[in-house]
Amino acid sequence: MFDYDPLDPRVLEDPFPFYRRLRDEAPAYYSKKYNTWFLSRFEDIWAAERDFKHFTIVNGQMPSQILGFEEFDSDQAEVEFGDSPASLDPPRHTHLRAALTSAFRPSAAQALEARTRELVRGFIDEFIDRGEADVVLDLAMRTSVRIASTLIGLPLDMADWFVERVNAMFIRDETGWQRTDDGMAGVLELHAFLAEFIAERRRRGGSSDDAIDRLLNAKIQGESLSDKDCLSTISLLLVGGTETLPKAFSGAVYRLGKHPDQRSACVENPSLVPSAFQEALRMDMPTQMLGRFVAKTWEIHGQSLEPGQGVLFLWASANRDDREFPDPDRFDIQRQAPRILTFGAGPHMCLGAHVARMEGEVMLQELLARVPEYELLMDDAVQMRSEVFRGYVSLPIRFPTT
């Protein structure tokens, strides 16, 4: 038996060989160091995500919470967070999520498509004559934060400030998993701004068709949400809507850059773009793992997961499981996998999945329409490697100008 530790520098550098061994040799792997189980196969995680009899999310889902290492310094530990869809089990989770669902349905994503396309075309106009661009910083991050802010009801003139604070939250020091002082300060600054913004919206009253208004007016099992509950949920929506999509999109640009024949197919037939983006979501999903705590003994692969133990779902491993995906390490825009775990599964599936797909597809369509051929400038690319996220935070490309 080999040792697996998600914080091992070798794992942070390249987790996929470790994931393969876990799937083949120890699909339910127990770490005594962390008193935590790791699930690595697709079907196991797909089932566990839906199981609130045996697993609970109320004590946390982030690796830092489950593995037991501190993510905040003493000052930040005093910040009080309320409930959000990421910290509740059904039925309260069901009611809180229902208050937001209509803003994130497929029809809502479709309603935002024209605005998204307008933004993307404008951003491409700004760099098209340069012959170079950073698809994360010049395009994807700018688009995602503005669409997220629109849905939430946050001021668009603060978009770049939001990006700086959200990005800082995920900067790690030389260990690869501990936050920097700047990152910690970014958490506090964003928290303080959102707290005051929500309090002001409550004082002002009125009605707006956005997530903040829906939360302020929601009744969850007969009770109104506190400002702390609203803050936690809005933070979740802003960070999730801003941080992960650019990494997923840059993964698609990277894969198509490495497979010019498949890129050309998408240029010639834009109807292939949704399946190309789906395949990139499978292969290069940004979120490596999230998890639960065991609430009731669960038997799997001859192992007993006991109450109080942590369990982490290795989503990125599951998306490369050859039991679910033939030849899983091959990028194939024709694959059309019927299910992937990039957005999770079950009741806690990512609320913004439909919007994220729309944004990614629009950005890819518009970029390929204007930049059908490009060269990846990998010497200048910057990839984040942490226990939670993996993906490009900077991916420059070079292309011919007309």
Image (spheres, helix red, strand yellow):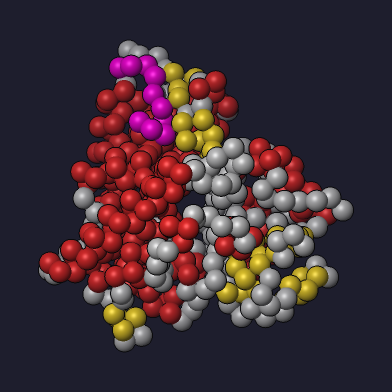
Residue 336: x and y in percent read: 56, 48
Q: Which residue is drawn at 39% across and 19% down?
A: 132
Residue 131: x and y in percent read: 37, 16
Between residues 247 and 199, which one lies in front from this camera angle?
199
One can see residue 268 in this view: no
Q: Quadrant of residue 37?
A: bottom right
Residue 400: x and y in percent read: 40, 14
Between residues 81 and 160, which one lies in front from this camera angle?
81
As displayed, is residue 181 above or below residue 397? below
Magenta stretch contains residue 104: no
As displayed, is residue 219 above or below residue 231? below
**Furthest-right residue in view?**
1
Residue 91: x and y in percent read: 46, 81
Q: Residue at x 68, y 77 (%)?
A: 307
Q: In which quarter of the image is residue 103?
A: bottom left
Q: In this view, does 10 lie to the left or right of 338?
A: right
Q: In this view, does 229 lie to the left or right of 393?
A: left
Chain part drawn in magenta: 129-138
**Furthest-bottom residue in view?**
222
Q: Residue at x 74, y 59 (%)?
A: 33
Quarter of the C terminus within the rendering:
top left
Q: In this view, does 293 lie to the left or right of 18?
A: left
One can see residue 8 in this view: yes
Between residues 240 and 306, which one lies in front from this camera angle?
306
Q: Residue at x 60, y 42 (%)?
A: 176
As displayed, is residue 366 above or below residue 234? above
